Amino acid sequence: MATRTVSNNSLVEGVKNSLILSALESGDAMTEASLCKRLKVIRSALEGVAARLAASKIQPKDLERLAQLVSKRDDAAKQGNPKAVDQYDIDFHQTIIDVADNGCVRDIVRNMHLYDRIFRYPASPYSVYDEHQDYSHAAIIAALASGDPDKAEDLIKRHIQAAKKCRVEALIGKVNLFE
């Protein structure tokens, strides 16, 4: 157990360092926006792996929990509570990671959620438009329920990339998602 903890701590530290090094190597300034972009790219890849793994082992109770979290997130948005919206969103993603049951991904993403929170406030306003996209929370749940790992991975990656775009735009204005 101690070896695994040391290994996971090293991986978490490596992710943090790779964010900084990739910015320095590319010549980018260490701005909130550049770190946010890199964070979302790494999160997208890791959560894509988690969605792929979860698609083969998700249970009806897990699907119900995901649906409940989306419903609670929507209720929090209607009440104008952005912190609750964000917490339910994090819980949604964490549930998928928990179902995937990969300790390395779980530990790295848990720490990345802590970094990600730095960029959440002030949060961009929640939009019901988010849930009408083909990469919505409901679409992710449907892909997981179908047991299709390719679709689950693709949708969660697109979902996180769209979130990245919203966060970066909240920090610096309109951006090209493919920068």
Image (tube, rainbow, N blue to C red):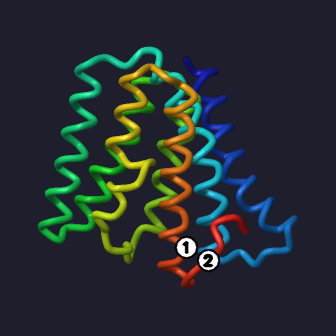
Q: Nearer the viewer, residue 72 or 102?
A: 72
Residue at 48% across / 51% down in the picture?
A: 159
Residue at 45% across / 32% down in the picture?
A: 97
Q: Position of residue 84 (x, y in %)?
A: 23, 59
Q: Which residue is mark 1?
A: 168
Characterize the local packing of mark 2: few (<14), some (14-19) or many (20 or more) Cα atoms within 10 angstroms: few
Q: Is residue 100 above or below residue 25?
A: above
Q: Work out how far the residue at label 1 is from the one at label 2, CA to CA, in angstroms.
A: 7 Å
Q: Is residue 160 above or below residue 139?
A: below
Which element is circle 1 on? Answer: helix
In the rendered structure, which disc, 1 or 2, sits on the residue that comes first in sequence? 1
The three-letter code of the residue at mark 1 reads Val
Q: Is residue 119 above or below residue 50?
A: below
Q: Kindly indicate the quadrant of the structure image that contains residue 176.
A: bottom right
Q: In this rendering, would 150 be left or right of 113?
A: right
Q: Is residue 174 above or below residue 139?
A: below
Which element is circle 2 on? Answer: loop
Q: In this rendering, would 9 be left or right of 106?
A: right
The three-letter code of the residue at mark 2 reads Val
In the image, which disc is placed on residue 58? Answer: none
Q: Position of residue 164 (x, y in %)?
A: 54, 63
In the image, which disc is placed on residue 175? Answer: 2
User: In what quadrant of the picture does the N terminus appear?
Assistant: top right
Q: Position of residue 109 (x, y in %)?
A: 52, 42
Characterize the local packing of mark 1: few (<14), some (14-19) or many (20 or more) Cα atoms within 10 angstroms: many
Instruction: Please report contact status of discs 1 and 2: CB closer than 8 Å, yes or no.
Output: yes
Q: Position of residue 71 (x, y in %)?
A: 18, 47
> Nearer the viewer's eye, disc 1 or disc 2?
2
Q: In this rendering, would 55 be left or right of 5?
A: left
Residue at 55% across / 35% down in the picture?
A: 153
Residue at 68% across / 47% down in the picture?
A: 15
